[in-house]
Image (cartoon, helix red, strand yellow):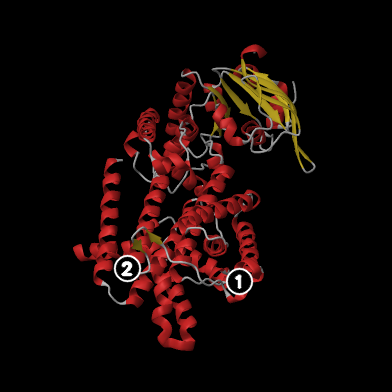
Amino acid sequence: MKSSTLRNIIYYTLFALIVIICGKTVENAYYLQVLTFIGINTLLAVSLNMLMGYAGQISLGHAAFYGIGAYATAILTVHYGFSPWLALPAAIGAAMIVAYLVGMPTLKLSGYYLAMGTLGFGMIVHILFREWSGVTGGASGFVGIPPLEIGPVNFVSDKNYLYLVWGTVLFTIILCRRIIDSRIGRALRAIHDGEKAAAAVGVDTRKLKLQIFVFSAAFAALAGFLYAHFVYFISPGTFDFITSVRIVTMVVIGGMASIWGSILGAALLTLLPEWLHAFSEFEMIVYGLILMLVMIFLPRGLTRGILSLFERFRRSDGR
Amino acid sequence: MGADNALLAIDSVSKAFGGVQALADITFSLDAGAITGLIGPNGAGKTTLFNLITGVFPTDTGQIRFDDRIIDRRPVHERVQLGIARTFQNVELFESMTVLENILVGRHTRTRYGILASMIRPPGVGREEKKATEKAIDLLDFIGLGEYAHRQSSDLAFGWQRLLELGRALASRPRLLLLDEPAAGLNIVETLQLGTLIKKIRDQGITILLVEHDMSLTMDVSDRIIVLDQGRKIADGTPREVQENEAVMKAYLGETRQNP
């Protein structure tokens, strides 16, 4: 118990140090922007990992909650003149309420059927963003979202935003780790291992699945909030089915039930398209090929895959 | 067998799946603190009865009372909360977890804090976790798996997995323990040790309903035996009475046996 707490503190400190070093050394605006996007995607991947990796429930509609967070803060700040800091709890609250209402019937489903249910939900939300043009700006998008500021500190500079996003990531990771290392986390993993057995030891599986679904929606909405106030412009295309699939891919590539792996997954899926521009029209082919190779050679995800490669290397070295 | 101090009362319970009558008009009650063996040929309805008592599916007709409370329509997890725990015929451990964590999940209903408290971590959470871990280690010592606490549960030998599943059920501090073929797949020595353990559990005041095909184990540990055949109760009595029962012999050996 004690040693795991100590280990977590070491990880968190290392994490904070790396973020600060990045902030101090990286001057190029483009790199700062990419690092910020990795942070936002990490939030999405970590929150989905709680649902997918730990509780074992597949959602193909995570982008919907991401979009609800982004559109809620856009609408409230631009149309209604809210301060973004007031819009934040409203955006998260809206996503949580929607998740609760959608989760109640859909979480009775499991496996493929849950995937189909959440897929349908994601599509409906995406269509709403696109067609409800009076409120959302329709297909041409929503412009003029204000930047964030707290008193004298504004988050217009890319460096400040980098710190804000990665600070939020650290905060989220700490919360997730606390849930995982608790009675609730054990019950979630129990559901993943066997729902029948989990119920037989007294876990209210329906309630817990719903709770973690709402939790993961809240943090997806937080990611949406950070995204909207970073780029000042949002459009429905960012929150479509493909984005949901990309978030699932981040979780799987990084490693199911691995919080730190989600950072790697998010980083790889954010960086790959940037690196692959050189391939122009072959970009998607190479992208898909790399993902396939990762899954073939590291089926348990990047983190565990790299760790076991390292183990093997060390063992053969010792002989 | 007075109905007054009965812990579990099954009253005219029936259950059909499609056209198949799995259980027909079953009535019996279990006195607190005894081991009752539930036997019968394959397809007699033993596992169905377990599933009705634990709430995996509802009864068609009849009533189940636990500790004078009607529990027919309560979901599985609430019945665990009330004090009914079970093991499975095919061991169903949480394989991604260690031995200790399996026991800790077993204590789920005896720990309180929720998802918000797990994030905020008020001091009570730490205390609850510490106490849960201590009790879990005590329990592991009781079932004899103390030194394997931090092993991955899937790495245990099969016999120990069975023990661990039993320990996980005990972790919920049940008053009624349902064991579904706990000796299946165990060797002779392990079966003997299991018998001793089952009696030790009864001596702690836990009522046990035991489904088991190993007759020597069942006859040895049971205070009373109920026999099911094709969904009906055909006998109910002490091990000796049941062994001499005409209907039981017919059910097990068929109609060929003739009286001289």
Q: Chain of mark 1?
A: A
- Asked which secondary structure carries label 2, the reply is helix
Image position, residue A95 (x, y; %): 56, 55
> Mark 1, residues whose alpha carbon is within 10 Å: few (<14), some, or many (≥20)?
some
Given residues B257 and B106, the one toward you in this image is: B106
Image position, residue A236 (x, y; %): 58, 71
Given residues B92 and A130, the one toward you in this image is: A130
**Residue displayed at 43% across by 60% down:** A43
Inspect this view and state whether residue A280 appears: yes
> Mark 2, residues whose alpha carbon is within 10 Å: few (<14), some, or many (≥20)?
many
In the depicted structure, whether residue A310 falls above or below residue B143 = below
Q: Amino acid at mark 1?
A: Gly
Among the two numbered marks 1 and 2 on one chain, the one whose residue lies closer to the N terminus? 1
Quarter of the image with the C terminus of chain B is top right
Labelled disc at residue B212:
none
Q: Amino acid at mark 2?
A: Lys
Q: Is B248 left, or right, of A43 in this rendering? A: right
Q: Chain of mark 2?
A: A
Image position, residue B145 (x, y; %): 37, 35
In the depicted structure, whether residue A245 falls above or below residue B46 = below
Given residues A278 and B46, the one toward you in this image is: A278
Labelled disc at residue A159:
2
Pointer 1 residue = A137
**Residue displayed at 51% across by 41% down:** B91
CA distance separating discs 1 and 2: 30 Å
- Asked which secondary structure carries label 1, the reply is loop
